[in-house]
Image (tube, coloured by chain):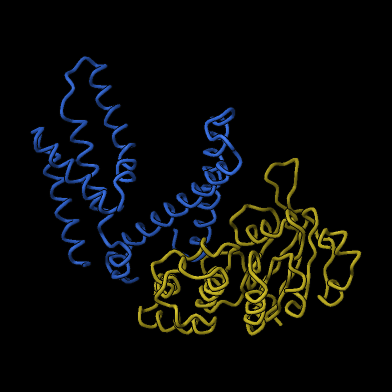
Amino acid sequence: MRALRIASALLLFGAAGLTATVANPEYLLAALALALTLRAMAFRCLRRAIQSTLPIVLFAGILALMQWASSTPVSSLPLRAIAVILLTTTAFRLLPWTEILSAVRPGSRFFGLVLFALFVRHFVAIFARESQRVLQARRLRLSRPWGPGAFRSLTSAVAALFSRSLTRAERFYAAQLLRGLAE
Amino acid sequence: MKPVLEVENLSFAYNSTCPVLDGIAFTVFERECLAIVGANGAGKSTLLWCLLGLLKATGKVRFFGEPLCRRTLARIGVVFQNPEDQLFMPRLLDDLTLPLVNRGLPVTNARAIALAALDGVGLHNVNNRPASHLSLGERKRAAIGAALAGSPDLVLLDEPTAELDGRAVRQLGGLLQTLTVARVIASHDLSFLQGLAQHVLVLAGGKILAAGPSAQVLANRSLLEQAGLL
């Protein structure tokens, strides 16, 4: 199973590389469909898979808007960007990261790189957990999530999220500094 | 007994108008357990951060007779309030091995020491699991194990009983009682500190309100009430 996941991830990385260089719309649409199907399988839910693509679609939309605003013809770049990002992120999701990182032991050649990845992973986990808590707290206090004061509470929640994450990140950095790992 | 930590006239302020710590002075000797007690916001954690050089304070702090440097830092074990701030590796064993390898110890030796440290805190059987899969009590013990793995001469613990249930507090107290190294424990959990600390330093409003043998200080109800601990 692990080998299958790694092989699929490598194939997807290859497909992403190919997609980055190809402008054929049929190929791009096929790559998009493949990425979305795999993403839905990874999420085990089509709705969540589509929802997770919204930031990427927004990014591509802005890209297309910028091309249109600068009076240049809208190219296949936005579509290509969506396909490449979807394929790459799906490949990242497929990789058994914990097992790969565990396989590299402290003291080995690639450990510096692994340590960096572990730090990033820890920060992302902290950020994700804090986001969940802040948004849950907001949800519990608002009977109508988009009623009066919703926008203000959302901006306050986001601000609180940043300050909380910063504090947690600062403590994490201090702890690692004292362990002699963050120099 | 030799002093392991000497603090003289330590002061700290986030801004000049409002000092958080003012004129703190105390000494911790070898094998001694000092408790720093105070209500929330008294400055306990800030004091620990200042001692460790994480916040720039004025005054003198000497560990083992010299200022804080990489060499003295290697002789200090620190346990943060939230164990998640310390443990992040995919396996608990790696979390304990890593600082030892980082100091130049061969991996096999480091792993043996880490396993012994995990054994010491009763977590030998979960060494292959990540810290995030453990209970909070286990994570606290793992953080203590991580601090002890480096064979420190001084351990600083920030609110070790925060968010722990009664059983976990008792287990933690038992574990800390078995340690022979000098310990500085910042906490407001007076029942936990009774019988564990030899000396107590009471902080209130960033100043030392009282200091002395724990039996004497912790029995003084009016003092504890004044410090906001009762």
Classify A22 as above or below B89: above
Image quadrant in which you'd find residue B162: bottom right
Classify residue A148 as left or right of residue B104: right
Classify B204 as above or below B167: above
Q: Which quadrant of the figure contains the N terminus of chain A? A: bottom left
Q: Which quadrant of the figure contains the C terminus of chain A? A: bottom left
- Residue plotted at (26% across, 49% down): A40
In this orientation, which residue lies closer to the viewer: B49 or A88?
Answer: A88
In this orientation, which residue lies closer to the viewer: A144 or B177?
Answer: A144
- Residue plotted at (78% across, 67% down): B201
- Residue plotted at (54% across, 38% down): A159
Q: In this rendering, does residue B76 appear at all?
A: no
Q: Position of residue A142 (x, y in %)?
A: 59, 38
Q: Extreme top residue here? A: A71
In this orientation, which residue lies closer to the viewer: A122 or A40?
Answer: A40
Q: Position of residue B61 (x, y in %)?
A: 67, 63
Classify B154 as above or below A163: below
- Residue plotted at (82% across, 58% down): B228
Classify residue B98 as left or right of residue B225: left
Q: Position of residue B40 (x, y in %)?
A: 73, 56
Image quadrant in which you'd find residue A69: top left
Chain coloured blue in this rendering: A
Check the rendered structure and report the hue given to chain B: yellow
In this orientation, which residue lies closer to the viewer: A111 or A51?
Answer: A51
Q: Extreme right residue here? A: B222
Q: In this rendering, does residue B40 appear at all?
A: yes
Q: Position of residue B121 (x, y in %)?
A: 54, 81
How many numbered discs sit on the rendered protein? 0
Classify residue A53 as left or right of residue B197: left
